[in-house]
Amino acid sequence: MARLDILTANDVTGEYPGSYYASLATPLARFAPAEGEIACDVCVIGGGFTGLSAALHMAEAGLDVVLLEAQRVGFGASGRNGGQVGSGQRLEQDALERMVGVERARALWDLAREAVALTRELAARHAPEAGFAPGVIHADHRARYVPDTHAYVHKLREEYGFEAIRALDRDELRALVGSDAYHGGALDMEAGHLDPLAYALGLARAAVAAGVRVHEGSRVLRVNEGDPARVETDRAVVRAGHVLWAANGYLGHAERRVAARVMPINNFIVATEPLGDLARRLIAENHAVADSKFVINYFRLSPDGRMLFGGGESYGYRFPADIAAKARRPMLEIFPELAEVRIDHAWGGTLGITVNRMPCFARLSGNVLTASGYSGHGVALATLGGKLMAEAVAGQAGRFDLMAEVPTPRFPGGTALRTPLLVLAMLWFSLRDRL
């Protein structure tokens, strides 16, 4: 059986998906594919948030950087996600304290807060059109979850001094989110949301202005590690002092040591027609919302008053024929009043998850690093991940190593069993959410 090509299975080569974000974007002129013999200080593989941030930070530090993107910059999850810039790591601090101890957990919390601040700063400087808006609501879909959520808010405020978050009871949440589906939750005003494709394109423009040589349509076929490392595409050979893998869910089988720990999964988003006055009755204060389901629903309003709703589980790596129907079903469970509303855009994307939902940072060899597997929490953490890799290349690896020391186990059975295990897991958790 032919192996699925994750880069082309669901998309047109060299074209952005038909997302709401793409309908607004002014794409950059296409960057020419890499050709011939190229030498550089650092070769970055992947043109999403991680790769663009790494390239930008290294170029600003005076390094000669080549970035290879198989499709287009911002093509992958970076340019098509829900746009939520969340606080903290993907795991809550309680779980991190048990996993790595209190001291390291606090250091990871500080890094995550820096990730949000860095994302806001880079967006303001390089992509003001991305329109960062503050506020992310966590909404509990079961009443029994609310006490735990409120206890976690108390922990963050009292033990971590994080005063940007507050607990919401049912009435307070209902005043912010016009749905009977939720019983309480929390509001984090340090977190927020933005247009992710506009942000990615802004990072790309800044990287080019700083001197990064970007090549699109340049799929990496193999990396021969050494000093220098040799990175091969179908038309070029790049010799680099360092190589940074930043491909996340679109890595495929290109780097098996990472693929064993980072699994690609799909998610789907719809954008309705503009809702007029109804928009503010559904989300009163322009905060983003993410709920407590394992197969998570996440949604927010666009600047022109559309509902941008993400959800719907996927049991394979190919997108469904009717993406709009896939995401419409959970949307109507939350907002039945949208039943007759037109869907103007529907798209899917592939992200990378890990077994324990913590990112996979690793030094694959002395001069080859990787960062990926953000598990749906990557807008801020991927931006920071690129900066941490840039620091490591510059010889200041302590913060990168802090992330790399967090365990990211291999998936049972490696890459061969990821697909059947994904099907079983998604079926189980989807059933748990419903029951």
Image: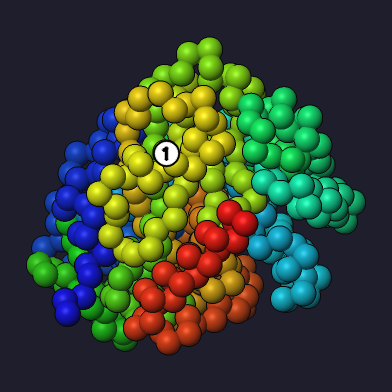
Q: Quadrant of residue 199?
A: top left
Query: Residue 154: x percent and y percent?
Result: 87, 50
Q: Farthest top residue?
A: 277
| Residue 391 seen in this snapshot | no
Judge left or right: residue 202 versus residue 193: left
Question: Looking at the picture, does residue 61 appear above or below residue 362?
Answer: above
Judge left or right: residue 98 versus residue 195: right
Say which amino acid is labelled 1: Arg
Question: Looking at the picture, does residue 185 appear above or below residue 213?
Answer: above
| Residue 276 seen in this snapshot | yes
**Residue sitting at x 54%, y 31%:** 335
Query: Residue 367: x percent and y percent?
Result: 41, 79
Judge left or right: residue 69 versus residue 191: left
Quarter of the image with the N terminus is bottom left
Q: What residue does disc 1 label?
A: 328
Q: Secondary structure at mark 1?
A: helix
Q: Farthest front residue?
A: 435
**Crowdedness near tag 1: few (<14), some (14–19) or many (≥20) residues, C-alpha within 10 Å:** many
Query: Residue 169: x percent and y percent?
Result: 81, 37
Question: Looking at the picture, does residue 282 appear above or below residue 69?
Answer: above
Q: Quadrant of residue 92?
A: bottom right
Quarter of the image with the C terminus is bottom right
Query: Residue 325: x percent and y percent?
Result: 35, 41
Work out whether residue 96 or residue 161 is closer to the camera in this orientation and state it.
96
